[in-house]
Amino acid sequence: MLQNTQAVGVSGGVRGASRPLLLCDLTQSYSPSGGGGISTYLREKRDYVLTHTPHHLLQIVPGPEDRVTVNGRHIFVEVGADPVRGSPNYRFILRTGKVREVLAEYRPDVIESLCPWLLPWTAINHRKAFPETTLVAGYRTDFPNAHIYRVGREKFGETTARILRSLIWGYAEVTYREFDWVYTLSEDARAALRKRTITRSSVLPLGVDTDLFHPSKRDPDYRRSLGLSGQGPLLVYAGRIDNEKRADRLVEMMRRLPRDLGAALVMVGDGKLRARLEAEAADLPVAFTGFEEDRGELARALASGDIYVSAMADETFGVSVLEAQASGLPIIGVTGGAMPDRVPEGTGLLSPVDDMVAMAANVAAIWPDRARDMGQAGRALVEANYSWRRTFETLFGDIYPAAMANTARRLEEDAALLFPPKRDPRSRTYRGTLATA
């Protein structure tokens, strides 16, 4: 199998590895036509592994049917899964036995779990059968708040939502303590895990392709091609059009803008709220372009806008914000999640979560006099601090070695339990069973 590839010295990027490794990404949060930060991460990681390392990469994702695609050192495994209700671009794997079969067949050295539901325990159970497997978890979504508390509060009220969130934090504690290492996307998220005694952790900064997402991709005819009227700012949002992203707030914000500002909004993406919002925004200068599979066209859309807008309150990193900044756009967002980290002073304005009056006022406040300078400051920020190369150098140079070191410690502890030290009656000291054999 691939993990038995002949050693070629210290493997590129993973300190301490004496041979090419078989690395595995395992996630529910993938869609070939739904976008999302994890889909971008999987693509960028594949390119980095194949270009900069000798390692093999196994990526296991949901798909319409069971299918394995091998392209050199990249193995792409789709496990047949039904679509998620209300989110047709995404599928959810329930056939964990099939995932276990794939893991047992390929025996990866490192499994990186990229989502919180069900599959982390598939990896944990695989490790019980193959204890030498290193487990890394990416805590990439503030799911106790974003998926449980906020949804529960709307459906069941504040008290029930708090109880549900507490229960899910208990699940998170039990789950992530099983991993050799956990990475978060921000210091705030890492601090939240530490409060719950999940201490083997690091922060992994994500990146952006600053050559692809660049102000030079601006198309002066883009607005006209969408049939949008007005001479004011073209606002752009790129992401899922669903409740978690608070996409409906952007339509509300448009209604709060002064009509004489001449603003228009383009929403690039798809999701369960799209049809409803298209109907609600029929009288507004709002265009819904659907999910953009072509990254070059996405870069064109962002660079052709004037201001990037997002009402997402639970963003754990915000790759879409970085892509907008790389494209030269100022950011109008909210003071929630990772947004304050992504939008320092001088690169945009933030308003309280769900305060669409304040958000609309911020759009008007920066247009037109301050928008250009803020966009240039955001571009400079991204160029100086964010790149995918830095992301994967941190992953392979720091996080994976720390996780593999913990695996070694764990195996030593397991061996000590199997072969406990015994007393030497002559010296009154303990000697390990293996040493006296």
Image (cartoon, rainbow, N blue to C red):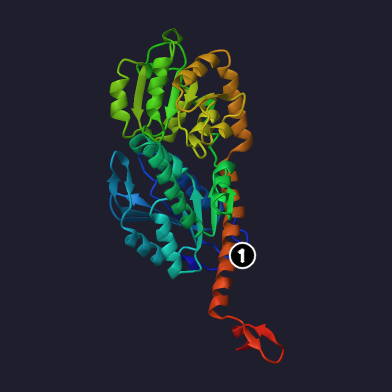
Left or right, residue 82 beside residue 392: left
Left or right, residue 290 beside residue 178: left
Furthest toward the front, the residue is 159
Residue 373: image location, x then y, percent: 60, 19
Q: Amino acid at mark 1?
A: Gly
Residue occupying image coordinates x 59% and y 38%: 386
Name the residue beneath numbered marker 1. Answer: 9
Residue occupying image coordinates x 34% and y 38%: 156
Quadrant for the N terminus in the image: bottom left
283 in relation to 115, above or below: above
Of residues 115 and 381, the one nearer the viewer is 115
362 in relation to 300, above or below: above
Q: Write down the quadrant of residue 25 in the picture.
A: bottom left
5 in relation to 62, above or below: below
Residue occupying image coordinates x 57% and y 57%: 400
Residue occupying image coordinates x 53% and y 32%: 339
Q: Write down the quadrant of residue 102 in the picture.
A: bottom left
Quadrant for the C terminus in the image: bottom right
Residue 224: image location, x then y, percent: 38, 16
Residue 300: image location, x then y, percent: 45, 27
Left or right, residue 93 beside residue 429: left
Is residue 299 something that shows in the picture?
Answer: yes
Furthest toward the bottom, the residue is 426
Residue 69: image location, x then y, percent: 36, 55
Judged from the image, the secondary structure of the residue bearing numbered disc 1 is loop
Of residues 143 and 167, the one nearer the viewer is 167
Is residue 76 something that shows in the picture?
Answer: no
